[in-house]
């Protein structure tokens, strides 16, 4: 699992700055002409800016000093706003703009922004996603499922490129934007970085979905009942918002913490995400080298 574009994200000691740096260059899970690539618009000195924010808390944007929201999606939105405005110099015209007609909410526009490079107003829909490739069974279809198997890559991709991306061009949306003095978007983009997790133990290979670029971040997954023969001594559980990679720590992985996290999977029947660490021989830091989802034995049946 290489860091985006070989950028050493482990250099950033502040988690929020490290997460933002990851967001700047993280590969997408959608392959489409409307995908937004932040790296194309970053200033040449963006790395120096991030390093300054990492070492000088008083210089950081408020979003990087505030406690992260417990819901990962909301946290990613705050980082994305920071990326767009404080780092890239764009203007946010509206955020989470609701489209309501006759008391009914049709949805919302995640971001309405102005691109300073061409002065064009753009509509951006964003998401952060994690999908596990399931080869299939007698009672469950093969596919790419989220930790909550009701979330599927094919459904989310179609929704992002269809309903969500096109929502900014609905007549109802255009009317409401005009009522608020907002210019209609000329461009609609999607932004969906994340990870695909391939089966660690399988008889047949799991092909990358056609809708996903070949260059994407990868991990592994396995069932809890298959973990006994695997060396987990360097594993640590990842707690949101630290699903945004990569994880680093100064202390040796705690076996008791790992055992408790594995036990919770059995008791709650909920998948958990873990990072496999390796100690840096130079500075002694423990750095993430892989990540693994461990799922209940009956996942993804629901």
Image (tube, rainbow, N blue to C red):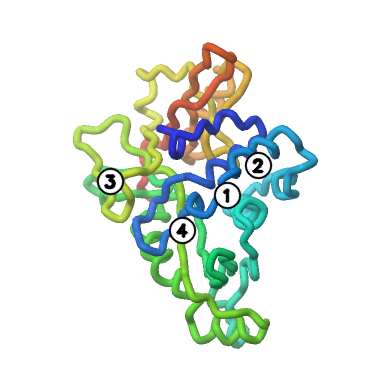
For label 2, the residue is 49
In this rendering, the label closer to the viewer, 2 or 3 = 2
Image-based side of 219 in relation to 16, left or right: left
Q: Is 69 or 295 nearer to us in this picture?
A: 69
Residue 220, position as x, y percentages in the image: 37, 34
Distance between mark 1 and mark 2 Cα atoms: 9 Å
For label 4, the residue is 36
Disc 1: CA contacts within 10 A as few (<14), some (14-19) or many (>=20): few
Q: Secondary structure at mark 4?
A: loop
Does the CB distance between marks 2 and 3 fall below 8 Å? Answer: no
Sooner in the amino-acid sequence: mark 4 or mark 1? 4
Sooner in the amino-acid sequence: mark 2 or mark 3? 2
Q: Secondary structure at mark 2?
A: helix
Residue 47, position as x, y percentages in the image: 59, 39
Sooner in the amino-acid sequence: mark 1 or mark 3? 1
For label 1, the residue is 43
Sooner in the amino-acid sequence: mark 4 or mark 2? 4
Distance between mark 3 and mark 4 Cα atoms: 21 Å
Image-based side of 238 in relation to 69, left or right: left
Residue drawn at 50 percent across, 56 percent down: 127
Q: Residue furthest right?
A: 58
In this rendering, the label closer to the viewer, 3 or 4 = 4
Residue drawn at 46 percent across, 65 percent down: 189
Residue drawn at 32 percent across, 31 percent down: 200
């Amino acid at each position: 699992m290489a860091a985006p574009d070989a950028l050493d994200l482990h250099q950033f000691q502040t988690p929020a700055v490290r997460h933002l740096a990851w967001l700047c260059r993280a590969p997408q899970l959608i392959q489409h002409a409307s995908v937004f690539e932040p790296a194309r618009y970053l200033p040449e000195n963006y790395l120096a800016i991030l390093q300054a924010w990492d070492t000088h808390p008083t210089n950081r944007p408020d979003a990087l000093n505030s406690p992260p929201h417990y819901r990962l999606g909301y946290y990613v939105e705050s980082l994305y706003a920071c990326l767009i405005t404080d780092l890239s110099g764009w203007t946010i015209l509206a955020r989470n703009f609701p489209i309501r007609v006759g008391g009914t909410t049709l949805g919302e526009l995640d971001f309405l922004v102005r691109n300073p490079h061409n002065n064009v107003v753009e509509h951006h829909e964003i998401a952060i996603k994690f999908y596990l490739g399931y080869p299939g069974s007698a009672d469950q279809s093969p596919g790419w499922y989220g930790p909550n198997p009701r979330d599927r890559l094919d459904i989310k991709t179609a929704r992002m490129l269809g309903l969500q991306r096109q929502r900014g061009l609905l007549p109802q949306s255009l009317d409401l934007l005009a009522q608020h003095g907002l210019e209609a978007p000329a461009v609609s983009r999607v932004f969906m970085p994340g990870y695909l997790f391939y089966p660690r133990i399988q008889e047949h290979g799991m092909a990358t979905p056609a809708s996903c670029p070949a260059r994407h971040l990868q991990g592994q997954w396995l069932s809890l009942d298959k973990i006994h023969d695997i060396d987990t001594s360097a594993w640590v559980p990842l707690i949101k918002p630290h699903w945004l990679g990569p994880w680093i720590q100064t202390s040796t992985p705690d076996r008791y913490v790992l055992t408790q996290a594995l036990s919770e999977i059995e008791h709650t029947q909920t998948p958990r995400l873990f990072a496999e660490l390796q100690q840096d021989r130079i500075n002694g830091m423990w750095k993430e080298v892989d990540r693994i989802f461990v799922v209940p034995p009956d996942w993804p049946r629901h």
